[in-house]
Image: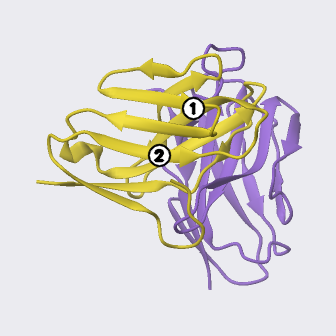
Chain colours: A purple, B yellow
Amino acid sequence: DGGITQSPKYLFRKEGQNVTLSCEQNLNHDAMYWYRQDPGQGLRLIYYSQIVNDFQKGDIAEGYSVSREKKESFPLTVTSAQKNPTAFYLCASSVLGSGSPGELFFGEGSRLTVL
Amino acid sequence: GESVGLHLPTLSVQEGDNSIINCAYSNSASDYFIWYKQESGKGPQFIIDIRSNMDKRQGQRVTVLLNKTVKHLSLQIAATQPGDSAVYFCAETPGGGNKLTFGTGTQLKVEL
């Protein structure tokens, strides 16, 4: 089945450690995104990429890094520089140039807890 | 509508009634609006979108209304069902692009 796969679903990390969240899509979408969601709040954009080997910072990129070496993969690294990393992380993809540019396809999310 | 902090606004409706979820936006440059549904522990799902050159758009059991004068967006769900229970987010973007700004969400609870 086509879709977005995020892993791991749950992750625990000690302070000071980097952690990488995986995001893979087999929808052949050009654009991919990472959002962060905190309890009772909306989604905030961390990074996005519209083409392989290129990505742009979103609204809250500090303390995060990404890569886009393959069209289907967009991993997110939460570094030790991120002050408050405990959150629900959502990866999404979309078709560029479609009639509904705001139609993002989301994964099931990864919940990161820093101990 | 919008809220700040940990407590989402909640709308409780009886099964079979119509639901109206509201959203206010502040960016006058926004010209494309989207509604998403998020069930507990899952990623959001696209429901419907509307461009600023329209004031109403209908989908299956859903209608989105846009009032640009007062910067207000609403999602109407007809004959609400238990499966509609979720958090609903509005999102906006200037220029009709794909870099979305999400609202804080409204929790819809359907009572049997």
In the rendering, at what x and y percent does residue A65 appear?
Answer: 83, 55
Q: Chain of mark 2?
A: B
Categorize mark 1 by other alpha carbons within 10 Å: few (<14), some (14-19), many (20+). Answer: some
Label 2 is placed on what type of residue? Asn
The residue located at (72%, 34%) in the rendering is B93
Quadrant (top left, top right, bottom left, bottom right) of the C terminus of chain A: bottom right
Instruction: Look at the image and tell me whether residue B112 can be seen.
Output: yes
Q: Are marks 2 and 1 in contact (CB under 8 Å)?
A: no
Image position of A68 (left or right of A30): right
* Viewer can see residue A104: no
Q: Residue B103, position in %: x, y?
A: 60, 51
Q: Residue furthest left?
A: B112
Q: Residues within 10 Å of mark 2 (few under 14, many from 20)?
A: some
Q: Residue at x 60, y 20 (%)?
A: A100
Find residue B100 and report its horizontal and vertical position in percent: 69, 39
Please indicate whether residue B47 sits to the left or right of residue B110 in the image.
right
- Residue under label 1, please give it: B67
Q: In this orientation, which residue lies closer to the viewer: A24 or B46?
A: B46
Which secondary structure lies at badge 1?
Answer: strand
Query: Which numbered disc, 2 or 1, marks the residue that appears first in the sequence?
Result: 2
Amino acid found under the numbered disc labelled 1: Asn
Do the residues indicated by labels 2 and 1 lie within the same chain of the protein?
Answer: yes
- Of residue A77 and residue B69, the one placed in the foreground of this image is B69
Q: Quadrant of residue A67?
A: top right
Q: Is residue B93 left or right of residue A25?
A: right
Question: In which quadrant will I find the N terminus of chain A?
Answer: top left
Distance, label 2 to label 1, CA atoms, is 11 Å
Q: Of A38 and A18, which appears nearest the observer?
A: A38
- The numbered dot on residue B22 is 2
In what element is the residue under mark 2?
strand
Q: Nearer the viewer, mark 2 or mark 1?
A: 1
